[in-house]
Image: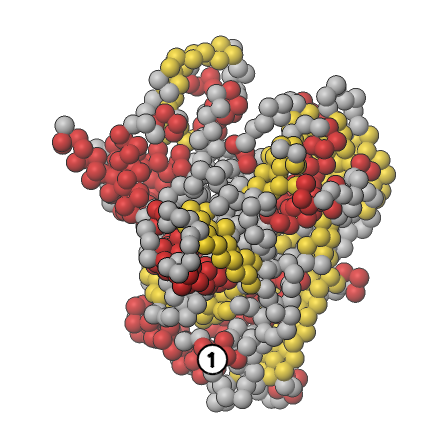
Amino acid sequence: MTPTPELRFFSDIEFPDQYYGVLIRSSIQRGHLVDIKSPALPDGYYLYSATDIPGENRLSAMGTTIPVFTPFEIQYYGEPLGIIVGPDLDVVLELVSEVLIETETLEPFQFGEQFSSSQVVGKRVLLSGDPDAAFSCDGRVFESTSEIGPQDHYYAEPLGVNVNVARGKLEIFTATQWPFHVRSTVSAVLDLDPCEIRVVPTATGESLDGKVWFPSLLAAQAALASVLCKKPVKIAFSRQEDFLFSVKSAPVQIRYRTVVADDGVIDAISARILINAGAYSPLIDEIVDRMTLAATGLYMARSYRVETFALKTNLPPMGALSGWGEGQVLFALETHLARVISERGYSPTEWKMMNLNVAGHDAPIDADMVKGARFAELFSAICAKSDYLRKYSAYERLNHARKDYRDGPLRGIGLVCGFQGNGFAGTRVGTSSYSVEITMETDGRVSIGCGLNSESMRQVITSIAANSLGIEESLISFTGINTDTMPATGPDTLSSKVSILAPLVEKCCATIQRQRFRHPLPITVKKSWKPSAQGYPFVSITPAVVACELELDPVTYDARIRGIWVATDAGKLYNRHAALTTIKKTIPIALSKMIAEHIVIKDGKIAPKQSVQYEILSPSEQPESDVIFIDSESDPKGIGSISLNLIPAAYAAALGQITGRQITKVPVDAESLYEFFESQEEAK
Amino acid sequence: MIIPFELNGNMVYIDSNPGERLVHILRRRFNLLTAKEGCLSGRCGSCMVLLDGKPVPSCIVPVFQIRNSSIVTLEHFSATPEYHDVMEGFANAGVSMCGFCDAGKIFIAHAIVSSETRMSKDEIKAMFAGNMCRCTNVDDLVAGVKNAIALRRKRTNAK
């Protein structure tokens, strides 16, 4: 269904006397800003920069700050230095192209194993047992390094914001996953009381977490201009500007070493994770936490060491893609383990099950959550649906016996297991509290206030409320969503809405249900959730098992997907169809990340032509897939990142079975497979 | 350059640079906002309109190409029974859309429903290749189109 009327798109909103803003950007990767030389500005056109900011020149999110307009130190190519606004967009664009920027250039920071301590912006180390002792023994050490490049979120509507003064308040329309962060940022930048600012979140569409904090930066820039020139100001990125200068997923390099004992149990895992955080990465703490926690999957090794470093470089801001790094780590881990399993000749399902539940062994995630993960049922469901065991054995035999790779068919099947962490990793107290307020009116109508601007989540919440109160869905509506009328909530990400809001809605409805025949209507009930300062990460985890079967064409090197199977325990399902849609629609996105999406950043710059050359798998190429939800009565769990977290790994494991090599780079396309097979031929 | 064309059933004349994108003309001069500015390269389908009855991405149509042609946007199309066939078909299949890509999905579905060719599931899916929005389960979309075909047949047979 299309969004409800109040969920508009910011790009459709125009005000009378509208001004348009275009950002002035740095033309060097690292250095100092000496001067901004403005062209002669016609009447009604203005240039604003850092010196015009009345409050604090910074956006803060989760412990990291980023300047709204850089005053002196340039940290990346394309960094905003100022803004020109005026009534005619074409004139503004021309004026921006005439701005002269005087700079002094400095040597940029590089990304790699050789880094200085000043580059480290995030670090976590997890140690359990004595992995060094295991690595120093005679047993075979398996080692691999995976590299995953930056990728774009490629949401439908490019980023932007429209700011207007209305009803005595500064009103901000933007597609944001975190409206209260927009408000606090603008408040700090303009030195205004938050009560003087109303943020109206517009529809985000499928943003894949590309709209968590960046809209707050744009809002601050547009709001500054709007207040100073006393006109409504709109910044609307073109697709190209969005592609070149918005946040990308952080590139990572992950090195795994493992030792497996003779009995098949993992003796030691060592993971060294390097994250390219770019010039700024406001979400980096959370990304570092999640990647560190996901580094051993849910496997219980006798000992492990995980070292994660986030490194500052002079690339544009790097951030989170849906899953916030879990997918990259699970890709590297599962492809590494697939190689171990193949070389040692284990049965993948038996070996995984054995190492998922080892008495006395340790894992970084709450043991109860891990033990509660019903992997035996998930593996069993996948094997039954996909015929995995027979296919895996047959393909192993065929692929090992093959003398020439052109002797087809080249088939492989990959099976991986892992999880999605729901909610934050637990250290973001204060930024991630959530509330729900529900009112049952005298006519039986119900209004829900929970700050949702996602249509699919509204469907789920509507189903829950209708079911709990025993009323028609048509009687349920959502209160106006803006920061004046909705309860303060943290960012709409990491499935926090389904894993936190859904139980809150249930509790509110249960309270109303108890009171409605004893107390007069209307009845209003509010419930809130705050993360605890101590304890284990995540509100919950969603365990899943995924299989992917491929056939590789030995002439074109195109890999055809013969099937994808996903089994998960998503807790109680209020709306099975919505849950199925969530997983199915993210399958082509995950595949697109695995086989198509590739960005080249040279000297800190993305070439403009890449914005139209960026390969994306069309949703119409969604392969045949089976999704299995095992029956559960536990609280609902997030499923939005399951495909992105596990399908690339399953795809790579299948390709690994065909090629006999571990796939270590993402994306992997026909050209790279061609090069791989050619190099094998030459080696003969 | 003066360019005459029929827009949503009315003849209009615009004075425009001939290379101006049709989507800009529709949004900025006529405030027809169902044609969205997405990729501006003809890939995402969010700016879809009917040009002489056929779906085209209006971001890659220069306005000189529409001289004396008929353009229909979703604003106008949504008042037709053909639109309701598609929307009812989608609703019955539980198709979810983010709203940004509606024009693309609805006009492509309309083209399939109006086509005299009987299409397989894969052929229907392939028709949506020019729609890059990631908000929908394509299996639902195919089911929605099939529903719409049945509804259209039922409606036309009833006449």
Quadrant of the image for the C terminus of chain B?
A: top left
Q: Residues within 10 Å of mark 1 (few under 14, many from 20)?
A: few
Q: Does A210 sit left or right of A351 as displayed?
A: right
Between B23 and A108, the one lying in front of the other is: B23
Q: Is residue A260 visible to us here?
A: no
Expressed as whole percent of the image width and height from the top left, the position of residue A40 reads 79, 21
Q: Amino acid at mark 1?
A: Lys
Residue extending farthest left: B158
Q: Quadrant of residue A228?
A: top right
Residue plotted at (72% across, 33% down)? A227
Expressed as whole percent of the image width and height from the top left, the position of residue B72 reads 37, 24
Between B53 and A221, the one lying in front of the other is: A221
Q: Is residue A513 visible to us here?
A: yes
Number of on-image labels: 1
Residue extending farthest top: B2
Residue plotted at (48% across, 20% down)? B30
Residue plotted at (40% across, 41% down)? A2
Q: Note whether A127 is above or below A572 in the view shown.
A: below
Q: Does A611 sit left or right of A375 as displayed?
A: right
Q: How is the image coloured?
A: secondary structure
Q: Does A137 sit left or right of A225 as displayed?
A: left
Q: Quadrant of residue A549?
A: bottom left
Expressed as whole percent of the image width and height from the top left, the position of residue A12 reads 52, 32
Between A477 and A83, the one lying in front of the other is: A477
Kindly identify which residue carries mark 1: A371
Residue plotted at (48% across, 61% down)? A504
Expressed as whole percent of the image width and height from the top left, the position of residue A480 reads 51, 43
Q: Note whether B151 is above or below A440 in the view shown.
A: above
The chain holding disc 1 is A
Between A205 and A261, the one lying in front of the other is: A205
Label 1 element class: helix
